[in-house]
Image (spheres, rainbow, N blue to C red):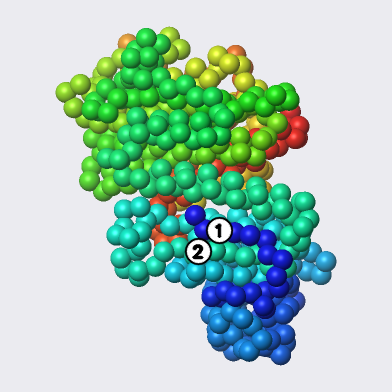
Amino acid sequence: MTALTLSTAAAAGLRADAIVVGVAKSPKGGGGLVVAPGAEAVDKAFDGKLAAVLETLGATGGEGEVTKLPSPSGLKAPVVLAVGLGTAPGKDATYAAESLRLAAGTAARALNGAKKAAFALPLTDAEATGAVAEGALLGAYAFDAYKENGKDAKNGKGPLGEIALTGGKPRDKAYKAAVERALAVTEELNRARDLVNTPPNDLDPEAFAAVAAAAAKEHGIKIQVLDEKALVKGGFGGILGVGAGSAAPPRLVKLAYTHAKATKHLAYVGKGITYDSGGISLKPAGHNETMKCDMSGAAAVFAAVVAAARLGLEVNVTGWLALAENMPSGSATRPGDVLRMYSGKTVEVLNTDAEGRLVLADALAKASEDKPDAIVDVATLTGAMVLALGNRTFGIMANDEAFRTSLHEIAGEVGEPSWPMPLPDHLRKGMDSPTADIANMGERMGGGLVAGLFLQEFVTDGIAWAHLDIAGPAFNEQGPFGYTPKGGTGSAVRTLVRLAERTAAGDLG
Ligand code: BES
Ligand code: MN
Ligand code: ZN
């Protein structure tokens, strides 16, 4: 991964391939440009005319905009890269954290192939510094494990090697902590992206569980892996039913991070379908090419638990990874089969492609037994949620309105677009089954909410529960933007980490 440090040296004197500065639209309007704080020395090297030069070059300061120009004498780095920050804040206000993340990520991506860059962006306070570090480290991500020499064959470039943040307070505790936090969170988030991007022939349930076991060992997290025999013994009919068609057997992984002084306990549950072919209700061509992403929920949960451990948060966090491969075969579950779930309920499987709710139901019922203070599940659950909210926004459903609102706010704070969705009672009857307690499918309309209602039935004891349907934002099939790469995005990791931080701080119920 790209290295990042808080530099004690000034930007102008740093030996680097490029200096990154921020440029923004003047808050006064009228199309004027302003250079963002942090770039004073660079502006000076341009005789105070950097904004004018950029304007002549056509820069507007818009988000996602990159302008590269050769350095004048006085700067050690040969190139200046100006990145757009959107509209500058008014007097006495500071740049929003998300503007800084987006700009830093855009700049890092534009510097693919470079060895080292100095980032002279506005590190106004520790929070801004954390945002720049986070954006830069997420933007510099590349998945090149399957490329010759670890480089993209098309442009022959690897990711930016090293980032020095200049203009901050490298000896200040809060600044240092913000950078440490960004390093831990982005390293785990980028690992979640790696898992999502890993082809399904190399990441089956067993392989995923092995990655989790290695990380748990490294970070002092307790782990328990239930293999197919243990799943049979335990009566996990949902997970077994989904995995029945695959040559690679399913797993249920429990990761338990505990802190001696913790007073609260969170349970995170992730959908981990390492490949979703649809099963006997096979997906048609055009709908299965990216279905290696169907374990994104489990990857997010895994990353969040490890990040919580690395940050030493004063809260207990249990992660549940419900891992299975959904394949058609002679041993696969058929539409019409009835599964006896871990909770004791029976489910008539009408469509084997509605498999996520089956593995999650078992994991939710099991997670409920510990009586955590709250449960959050994360899943690439329905195409319906993508139709409703698009490719960048996840839906939040919950059995507790206050909890749903908190999660929506937390997600916004960390820069993850989300939207609260309802769980209308009347949609439940569509899942009535003549044979079993419930069917795994209901009305087509509101399919994302139907799935949420199904899950809700497996959360017991009145535990506060929320469901994040990340089917849209988990995998980016379009071009990269801001700090989001093509492919696996690490959706929901930062929301889960912040929820754990806020819970540790006693901010929530
Ligand atoms: N993994 C899919 C949902 C999905 C779709 C994720 C697009 C990412 C992008 C899920 O298992 C699925 O197939 N859901 C079905 C449910 C239906 C059969 C009730 C769907 O949404 O079509
Ligand atoms: Mn499916
Ligand atoms: Zn699926």
Q: Is residue 145 left or right of residue 456?
A: left
143 left or right, relative to 70: left
The answer to whether 232 is drawn above or below residue 323 in the figure is above
Residue 186 visible in the current orientation: yes
**Residue located beneath label 1 in the image:** 3
48 left or right, relative to 283: right
Residue 490, image x, y percentages: 49, 46
Q: Quick one: which residue is furthest to the left in this view?
A: 330
- Residue 190 x/y as whole percent: 49, 49
Labels 2 and 1 touching (C-beta < 8 A): yes
Residue 237 visible in the picture? no
Marker disc for residue 161: 2
Helix, strand or loop for disc 2: loop
**Residue 355 x, y percent position in the rendering:** 35, 28
Question: How crowded is the residue under tag 2: few (<14 C-alpha within 10 Å), some, or many (20+)?
Answer: some
The residue positioned 38% from the left and 39% from the top of the image is 294
